[in-house]
Image (tube, rainbow, N blue to C red):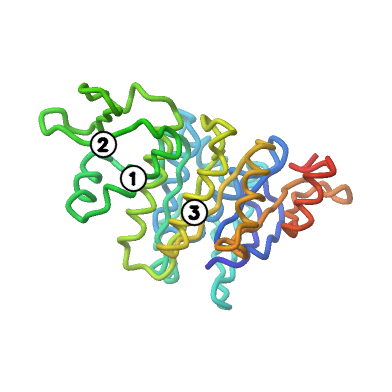
Amino acid sequence: MLQSIEIENFRCFEKTAISGFEQINLITGKNNAGKTALLEAIFYFLSSQRYAIIKNARKSSNEADNVKSIYFNQRTTIPISLSGYWDNERSLFSIKDVNAAYSPPAFTKDFELAFIVDKDSQIPVMEDIAAFFDDEVIAGNSRIIHDSLAVIDDTLEEIRTFGSRQGVLYLRKKGEENYVSINFYGDATQKIVRYVVNILSLAKSGKKFKLLLIDEIENGIHYIAQAEVWRMLMRLCKHFNIQLFATTHSLEMIKAFQQVCSEEELIGMGGYFELGRSPKNGQIIGVKHDLETLEYELASGDTIRGE
């Protein structure tokens, strides 16, 4: 697992070190505290496809602006420096020019990553989720996707594809004959499918380390289902040995995370981190909260989420 990361001159990070990552990590903080940028830094550091961050994570039509946005404060003469620890090994990645010819650092060969930006977008791009689903049917894993969707809607009876309508998953509810495209379902259903499909995709990798990054995990998921979503994700990540990093603004999602992390089978899996600005120098800092302390803070109404 990735245990810690040091970030220098990347996005909004001037110089920040965060340590104590667990298998399941929840990142919170105010707007512009660096939550998404932290996920980008992890992907940029550990993936052999780091240029995808430049092309996909920032949507400016001006490529020069996209390139400049990689650097802290857009000061393009300052090199980026990223380093991290995993399995008690440390590697450093430093670049002076994001436009220079790129050869992935040797250590990226050990890592497989997926970064889910929203229900429709991820890095690397998965062109055809329906085709992937068909592969999972053949492999005997389609039930995992069905059972995961039941967390959101237990009336779903069947998931399938149709060869004449490529690229689309169809769902059928109990007691109904018609199949409906997943595109007509809500964000939660579409996001759960993307989460689980990516977990199964990572599980197929022969790489030593597998990481799933999810930005704003709460979007579209009703608070009543959030604990079940966490429970499902933690169990799958535990089973397939995948490390998860997720960001949230939601107090309900934090409460659900703390609740599920306290369950016997999942104790010791979760890490909760808040990002905020240091009152001393204004730089971003990342603080890990003990989960027992977090439980007290939630019960007592103490400020959290970087507030």
Camera-side residue of 297 and 90: 297
Q: Are marks 2 and 3 in contact (CB under 8 Å)?
A: no
Q: Residue at x 38, y 68 (%)?
A: 109
Question: Is residue 232 visible from the viewing direction of this image?
Answer: yes
User: How far separated are the C-alphas under marks 2 and 1?
Assistant: 9 Å
Q: Circle 2 sits in a helix, a strand or a loop, which is it?
A: strand
Observer-side mark, 2 or 3, equals 2
Residue type, mark 3 in image: Phe
The part of the image, by quadrant, that contains residue 185 is top left
Residue for badge 1? 145
Residue that carries the numbered disc 2 in the rendered image: 159
Q: Which mark is residue 215?
A: none
Q: Tags 2 and 1 in contact by the CB under 8 Å rule? A: yes
Residue reaching furthest right? 280
Q: Amino acid at mark 1?
A: Ile
Q: Nearer the viewer, residue 89 or 230?
A: 230
**Along the line of sight, the residue nearer the viewer: 293 or 17:** 293
| Residue depicted at x 72% and y 49% | 274
Residues at marks 2 and 3, CA–CA distance in whole angstroms: 31 Å
The residue identified by callout 3 is 43
Amino acid of disc 2? Ile
Reply above or below: 134 against 190: below
In the rendered structure, are the residues bearing label 3 and label 1 in contact, judged by CB atoms less than 8 Å apart? no
Disc 2 or 1, which lies upstream in sequence?
1
Sequence-wise first label, 3 or 1 = 3
Q: Is residue 268 left or right of residue 151?
A: right
Q: Is residue 170 above or below residue 86?
A: above
The location of residue 113, given as percent across then percent down, is 42, 56
Q: Is residue 82 left or right of residue 292?
A: left
